[in-house]
Amino acid sequence: MKRHRFEPARLIAGLTALAIGSGYGLDALGLWQAPGLWLFLALPAGLVLSGITAAVRATASRDTPPTDPPPLPHT
C-alpha cells in the first residue's frame, strides 16, 4: 500500500463531516434531538478550522528544510 503524507486539514474536514452526518443520522432515527442551528453552523466552522490548519501547515513546512540527506557524490 502506498504511503501518503499526513494532512491534518483533511483530517479535520473529515471529522467535521462525520460529526455532522452522525448528528443528522441520530436525529433522523429519533435517538437524539439535534439542534438544527448548531449542526448547520458546524459545517462552515469546520471548514474554516480546516483552512486555518492548512495555511499554518503550509507556512510551517515552507520554513523547515527538507529532512532528506543530500545525495553522496560519486567518486
Image (tube, helix red, strand yellow):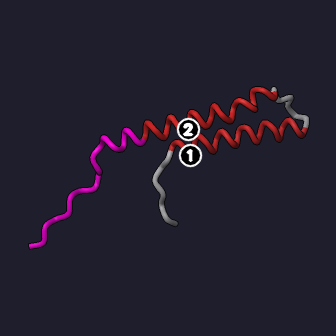
First in sequence: mark 2 vs mark 1? 1
Numbered circle sitting on residue 56 = none
- Residue 18 position, x and y percent, is 70, 43
Task: Give the answer, above or below, for where 68 lies relative to 72.
Answer: above
The stretch in magenta equals 58-75
Q: Counting other residues with Cα less than 10 Å from the Cα at mark 1, is it few (<14), some (14-19), or many (20 or more)?
A: some
- Residue 37 position, x and y percent, is 78, 26
Amino acid type of the residue that numbered disc 1 sits on in the rendered structure: Arg
At x 76% / y 42%, what residue is drawn?
Answer: 21
Most distant residue in the left direction: 75
Instruction: State how far apart marks 2 and 1 are (Cα).
Output: 7 Å
Tell me the residue that label 2 is attached to.
Answer: 50
At x 86% / y 35%, what residue is drawn?
Answer: 27
Q: Is residue 62 located in the magenta-colored stretch of the structure? A: yes
Task: Give the answer, above or below, for where 51 lies relative to 71.
Answer: above
Q: Secondary structure at mark 2?
A: helix
Tell me the residue that label 1 is attached to.
Answer: 10
Most distant residue in the right direction: 30
- Residue 12 position, x and y percent, is 58, 40
Q: Are marks 2 and 1 in contact (CB under 8 Å)?
A: yes
Amino acid type of the residue that numbered disc 2 sits on in the rendered structure: Ser
Quadrant in the picture for the C terminus: bottom left
Residue situated in front as seen by the camera: 45 or 73: 45
